[in-house]
Image (spheres, rainbow, N blue to C red):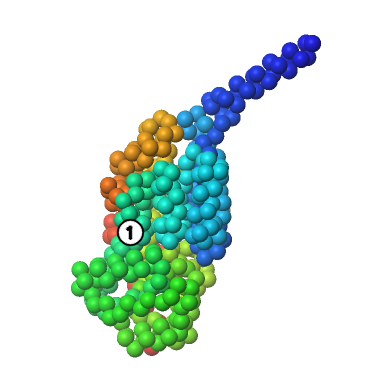
Amino acid sequence: MAIVKKLGIISITLIFLFLNPARGFTAIRTGVAISLTGKYEKPGNMVCLGYKLWEKEVNERGGLLGEKVKLIIFDDESDAEKSFSLYSKLIKEEKVDLVLSPYSSSITYKVSRVTEIYHYPMLVAGASDPHIWLRGYKYLFGMYALADRYFMGFLDIVAEYGFQKLVVVTEKDRFPLSAAEGIEKWSERFGLKVLDTIVYPKGRPDFVSIVAKIKKLAPDAMVLCAYPDDVYALMDSMKRAKYRPRAFAATIAPTFKDFGLRLGKDAEGVFGPSQWEANTRIPFPGTKKFIKSFKEFTKLTPTYHAASGYAACEILEKSINKVGAKDREKIASAISQMDTYTVLGRFRVDDRGIQVGHSPITIQWQNGKREIIWPRRMQTANPIFPVWYK
C-alpha cells in the first residue's frame, strides 16, 4: 500500500514537472526545411549551422520564456516543391511553434506562401530576390541586402579604375536574374556600358559558347550571376579558352574557403559580393565571439550564410523576449518595428519586409585569402587586376 501511495506521488510530481516550463521539460519547437543536399548544399548547410549554434547557445542561457528551444530540421534536397511540402508538414502536422527559413530565393518564394497563409513570421536568412517581398506579405522579413544591390561595390571599383565596358552572364533563376537586373541599373549610374547580358537556361549552361561570345565582345569587366557549380564550370571554360577579362566577379562561390582551395592560383583576383565576412574589421556587436564560437562548434570558418542564419535567430530571440510570449502575431509586429544590430549588421525592414538597414560588401581573392575591398571603411586591401593570358 505504501508503495502504491509513493508511486502516486511520483506520478503527480512527474506530471507537474512536465507541465512546468521553468523546469525545462517543455520546448519551443522551431521547424525548418533547408538544403542539406543538392544544388544549394554548401550555403544551405552553412545557414543551418548558424541555426544550430544559436540553438545550443540560447539553451545554455536558459532557453526562451523558460523553455528550451528544439529545432526540427528536414532536408529539402534543394527542391522547392519538396520544401513547400515539408513546411506544410511542419505547420499542419508537427504543429511547430515557430519556423526558420530555407535557403535560396526560388525555394523561399515558394515556401513563403504556406507560412504566410498560417501567419508564421519568417526571417529570410538565405534569399535576396526583391520579388519575394512584392506580394504584400505581412509575415516575411529579409535579412540580406537585396540582390539588385549585390554588385554596387564592384561597379564602383571598376569605374574608379577607368574600366568602361561590361558583360553580364546570368542563370535564368530568381536570384541570379535579380542580381543581373541590379547590375544593369547601377552600371548606368557609374557610367559603365553593359555590352550584353547573356541569360542561359537553368541547369543547362553552354559555357564554351558563352566564353567565345564574351571574348569577341572584349569587355573590360565581367560578372557571373549563378550558384557555385556554374561559377566553377565557367571559370574552367575560361581557363581552357585562355581568356579572362581584367576584372571578373561572381556570386556566392568566392565567399567560401573552398574556392581558394579548389582553384589555387586561378582564384587570384576574383571579386565577389558578400553580406558579411569572418574578419575582425567587421564592426558589428558580437562578431568576434560569433566567429570564435562557430569555429569551435563546427571546426569551420563561417561564411555570410552562417552569419545570416545566426543573425535571423538573434532577431527572433529579441522579438520573443520583447513580446514575452509565443504569440506569432505579436512577434511579427515586433520584428517589423525593430531597428537593431546583429552579427550580420544593422537590421531594419520597411513596410514590405524588405531589409533596408544592411548593406553588402565586396571581397577579392588575393594571395590565397579573401580581402575586403569595399566599402572603404572596412577595406583590408586595395583591388588588384592581374593579367591572366597574353
Nearest to the observer: residue 192 or residue 158: 192
Do we see residue 302 in this rendering?
no
Q: Position of residue 94 (x, y in %)?
A: 56, 42
User: Is residue 13 shown left or right of residue 360?
Assistant: right
Taking 375 as reference, is 217 above or below it?
A: below
Nearest to the observer: residue 389 or residue 180: 180
Taking 234 as reference, is 241 above or below it?
A: below
Q: Residue at x 36, y 84 (%)?
A: 214
SS for dot 1: helix
Nearest to the observer: residue 144 or residue 19: 19
**Quadrant (top left/top right/bottom left/bottom right) for the N terminus:** top right
Q: Amino acid at mark 1?
A: Pro
Q: Residue at x 53, y 53 (%)?
A: 85
| Residue at numbered disc 1 | 130
Instruction: Give the image quarter of residue 18.
Output: top right
Instruction: Give the image quarter of residue 36.
Output: bottom right
Taking 181 as reference, is 55 above or below it?
A: above
User: Is residue 2 shown left or right of residue 135?
Assistant: right
Q: Position of residue 290 (x, y in %)?
A: 46, 47
Q: Residue at x 40, y 71 (%)?
A: 172
Q: Position of residue 239 (x, y in %)?
A: 46, 82
Do we see residue 353 in this rendering?
yes
Q: Position of residue 199 (x, y in %)?
A: 37, 76
Q: Residue at x 55, y 64 (%)?
A: 38
